[in-house]
């Protein structure tokens, strides 16, 4: 089955710690995205990547970093600079960008502060 | 624009009835719209999409209506089932760019058996 796999499902972060969320897709999609979901709000874009070795900041990139060394992988690091990291994080991919194509989502990682 | 509220609008329907979920979008230049379904603890699933050159599109048990005059989108679910209970949200594509998809906050649909 093709799809997007996010891991872990639950993650806990200590003060001053960086944590990395994994996102892998086997859909052969060029574009990948990271969103943050908070209660009662729409998804907010953190970072996106159109192609390997290239990525762009979204609306709320501060305190986050990403890499795109392989087409199928787009890990997100939540750094200690992100002061309010508790949220549900969603990774998505699409065929050739979001224009006129739906995004396919993983099942998310819920990050909490210890 | 984005909602800053903490509570989602809620719609409760009786099993077997039809459901109508509404969404207002903000940009008259948006040309592509998508409805997603999100079950608790899971990622959003694509339901149906519509392009701005259409007013209506039907899928299996679902219909999306687009009214560009008032910038309004609706999702109709026929014969609602308990498995339809979820949060539904619309997304609009404001342009040919990867960062121009705007997601609404969603509506929570609860189906009463």
Image: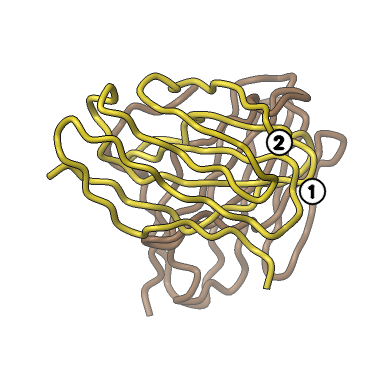
Q: For this rendering, which residue is in front, A74 or B91?
A: A74
At a point 33% along the width and 38% down the height, the residue shown is A38
Q: How far across and how far down the image is residue A55, in percent?
A: 62, 26
Left or right: residue B20 compared with residue B27 = left
Q: CA distance from mark 2 to mark 1?
A: 37 Å
For disc 2, the marked residue is: A52
Q: For this rendering, which residue is in front, B31 or A14?
A: A14
Residue A19 position by quadrant: top left
Tint of chain A: yellow
Q: Chain of mark 1?
A: B
Q: Is residue B26 above or below residue A30?
A: above
The image shows a total of numbered marks equal to: 2
Q: For this rendering, which residue is in front, B96 or A15?
A: A15
Left or right: residue B95 compared with residue B77 = right
At a point 50% along the width and 36% down the height, the residue shown is B104
At a point 63% along the width and 25% down the height, the residue shown is B99
Q: How far across and how far down the image is residue B36, in percent?
A: 58, 52
Residue A25 position by quadrant: bottom right
For disc 1, the marked residue is: B56
The quarter of the picture where the C terminus of chain B appears is: bottom left
Q: Is residue A43 above or below residue B60?
A: above
Under circle 2, the secondary element is loop
Left or right: residue A96 compared with residue A19 = right
Q: How far across and how far down the image is residue B46, in percent?
A: 64, 56
In the displayed orientation, state which residue is furthest to the front. Answer: A69
In the displayed orientation, state which residue is furthest to the right. Answer: B53
Tint of chain B: brown
Q: How far across and how far down the image is residue B69, in percent?
A: 73, 25
């Amino acid at each position: 089955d093709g799809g997007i796999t996010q891991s872990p499902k639950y993650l806990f972060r200590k003060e001053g710690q960086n944590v990395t969320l994994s996102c892998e897709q086997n859909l052969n999609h060029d574009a990948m995205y990271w969103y943050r979901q908070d209660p009662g709000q729409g998804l907010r874009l953190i970072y996106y990547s159109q192609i390997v070795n290239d990525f762009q900041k979204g609306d709320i990139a501060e305190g986050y970093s990403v890499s795109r060394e392989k087409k199928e992988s787009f890990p997100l690091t939540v750094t200690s600079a992100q002061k309010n990291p508790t949220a549900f994080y969603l990774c998505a991919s699409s065929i050739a960008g979001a224009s006129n194509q739906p995004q396919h989502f993983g099942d998310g990682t819920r990050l909490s502060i210890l | 624009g984005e909602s800053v509220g903490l509570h989602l609008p809620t719609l409760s329907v009786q099993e077997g009835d039809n459901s109508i979920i509404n969404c207002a979008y903000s940009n008259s230049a948006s040309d592509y719209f998508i409805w997603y379904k999100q079950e608790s603890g899971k990622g959003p699933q694509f339901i149906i999409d519509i392009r701005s050159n259409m007013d209506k599109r039907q899928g299996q048990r679902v219909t999306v209506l687009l009214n560009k005059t008032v910038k309004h989108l609706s999702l109709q679910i026929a014969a609602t089932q308990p498995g339809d209970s979820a949060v539904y949200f619309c997304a609009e594509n404001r342009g040919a760019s990867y960062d121009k998809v705007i997601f609404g906050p969603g509506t929570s649909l609860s189906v009463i058996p």
